[in-house]
Amino acid sequence: MRNRDDEISSQRRARTPLLYVALGAIFLLAVTGISLKALAHSPGTQVNMLLLAQASQGGNRQLPLQVRPASAVAFEAPELVLLDKTSVRAITPPQNLSASVLGALIGDSSTDSGSSREVQHYVVEKGDTIASLAERFGISADTIILANNLNSSSQLTPEEELLILPTSGALHLVRPGDTLSEIAVWYKGDIDEILYFNEITDAKDIFVGDLLIIPGGIKPAQLPAGRLTQLAGGYFMMPVPRSYKITQGLHPFNAIDFANGTCGGPAYAAASGLVQRVGYDGVAGNYVRIMHDNGVVTLYGHLSGQTVSSGERVGRGQIVGYIGYSGYTIPAGPRGCHLHFEVRGAANPFLK
């Protein structure tokens, strides 16, 4: 009989911690429920609550619950995380967290950093070869060769800049008259995949000067002729004051760099035209892109700021921005101030 009493007592002691945990969880849920109810009826409040339930086969399953009044965020209630089926942890994140940051706080992120669909600029390091870079980035060697106008025997040199596509395939510069259906036929590509990788929602939404990724594309031996523009001498003026000089020769994409060791100088429209895009890119930084009357497109990158807007008509020599070091420059910071000047659809007239 005594052994039976001891066994019952031992079982009760074993269940006691779990009972406390369950009571603690109920208390936290009750308090949070009251807070949510109050917040949902309070103007200027946004509540984001994330509960993690342990899946029956192991791992975590995210169950998002959001209350979103139209007014601005005031503060957030703590997130509750169920850990190992035995305890509850409350997390109070900072305001306006992205999914990846919130995932990092609770130890699980749904963001896949390897799913980028953007073309990268890569600066060659000592020991790099086309084969090693192809293996490193998970693409074919031919993709690197064709995107950078190289050949199979090309030797890479340190500090050389390369375009790295996010998938094996080809890169196409959109020229006047090009359509997406034509491009897909020329490169033996799939229109849906081209739309996906270039984040285009409508096949008609492509512009002269766009660089399109063609997943699995095979670059044709020759594209239809007659669509590239031959620049007349003097058509483009220097996009910088005469005090600037070329500090880097031809590099992706058909670009040269102008610098004079200072920041803040003006960047001029090399010819009259229509501003296609004004924006920011992780590599080019603040940029302006202009389509000129002859169908050639120029891009002005690493600007400290822009002075024009998309859709605006600009004249030859008009200031479109100021030279800076936004985006990715070598070296980084003020010492890297320069203008990245691209010509798409014709030869860069300032290349020496």
Image: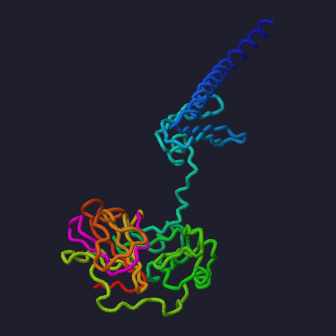
Say if the magenta span includes residue 265: yes
As displayed, is residue 192 above or below residue 24? below
Q: Residue furthest left?
A: 243
Residue that appears at 49% across and 40% down: 73
As displayed, is residue 305 above or below residue 73? below
Q: Position of residue 291 (x, y in %)?
A: 41, 79
Q: Position of residue 227 (x, y in %)?
A: 48, 89
Q: Quadrant of the C terminus?
A: bottom left
Say if the magenta span includes residue 205: no
The answer to whether 263 appears left or right of 273 in the picture is: left
Q: Position of residue 257 (x, y in %)?
A: 30, 74
The answer to whether 297 appears left or right of 70 in the picture is: left
Q: Position of residue 207 (x, y in %)?
A: 50, 77
| 183 or 2, nearer to the observer | 183
As displayed, is residue 13 above or below residue 282? above
Q: What range of the chain is rendered magenta?
A: 258-280
The answer to whether 43 appears left or right of 301 in the picture is: right
Whether residue 44 is visible: yes
Residue 42 is drawn in which quadrant? top right
Whether residue 141 is visible: no
